[in-house]
Image: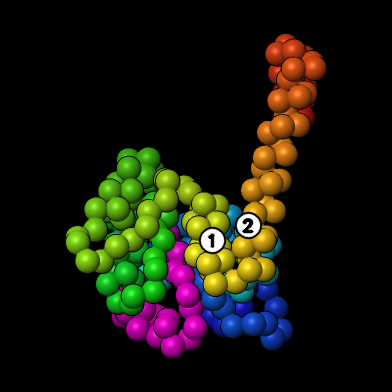
Amino acid sequence: MNSGPGNLNSAKAEPLPLVAVIMGSDSDLTTMKPAIEVLEKFGITVEVRILSAHRTPLEMVRFGEEAQAKGIKVIIAGAGGAAHLPGMIASLTAIPVIGVPVQSKALNGVDSMYSILQMPGGIPVATVAIGGGLNAGLLAAQILATANSNIYEQVTAYRQSLHQEVITKDKKLVDLGVKNYMSQMHNT
Ligand code: RP5
């Protein structure tokens, strides 16, 4: 994370943030954390902010207007319920916006999902699954990877690790059989 507003770590100097992860409330932080973690794992500096479309609309507008000049290349915006933050940010800047529907209590995030993905023509928001913070972070990294071979290699290595994980599990399942495999699953 960077040393600007929202940084939860130290104030030491870091490269300028390329990705902003913004959310409507601190209650969204658990959903957004995997996005922040995977970007930081790839060495990408992230600006993290709480900006509510309803409770702090003017701060949201200021952020949207200033994002391009600050060097932000991708914005990940998470919100739940009447989830207007991703769409409003997309209306304020031409920086690509990835929307993360946060799982809501009343409607399990279906409300968040429809609020985010049913954008009018001309103002797109790329929407990931309900609770899809990890994929939002990976998609942001993949967008940056189109112009950065180091990030491209890291995303490719990440995918190879997923591939290897499944190969290892498949071999173990074949070796142990379903019953033993499942009893080991329950013991770990
Ligand atoms: C939205 O309302 C936020 O994105 C959050 O998901 C939801 C609930 O916010 P809190 O009442 O938990 O602050 O604006």
Task: Identify the residue position indicated by label 1 in the image.
Answer: 142
Mark 1 or mark 2: name the one nearer the start of the chain. Answer: 1
Image quadrant in which you'd find residue 77: bottom left
The amino acid type found where label 1 is placed reads: Gln
Which quadrant of the rendered structure holds the C terminus? top right
Image quadrant in which you'd find residue 44: bottom right
83 within the magenta span: no
Choose between 107 and 154: the one closer to the eye. 154
Q: Secondary structure at mark 2?
A: helix
| Residue 144, placed above or below residue 188 | below
CA gap between label 1 and label 2 equals 7 Å
- Residue occupying the point 36% across, 78% down: 64
Q: Would you say 90 lies left or right of 160 here?
A: left
73 within the magenta span: yes
Residue 155's label in the rendered image is: 2
**Residue 127 pos. (x, y %):** 38, 54
**Residue 26 pos. (x, y %):** 49, 62
Report if the CB atoms under discs 1 and 2 are less than 8 Å apart.
yes
| Residue 117, placed above or below residue 171 | below
> Is residue 135 visible to the viewer in this orientation of the structure?
yes
**Secondary structure, magenta segment, majority class:** helix
Q: Secondary structure at mark 1?
A: helix
**Residue 173 pos. (x, y %):** 73, 20
Q: Rate crowding at label 2 as few (under 14), some (14 to 19) or many (20 or more) other CA atoms within 10 Å.
A: some
Q: Is mark 1 within 8 Å of ligand 1?
A: no
- Residue occupying the point 25% across, 66% down: 123
Which quadrant of the rendered structure holds the N terminus? bottom right
Choose between 35 and 51: the one closer to the eye. 35
Q: How many marks?
A: 2
**Residue 86 pos. (x, y %):** 35, 64
Stretch of the chain drawn in magenta? 57-78
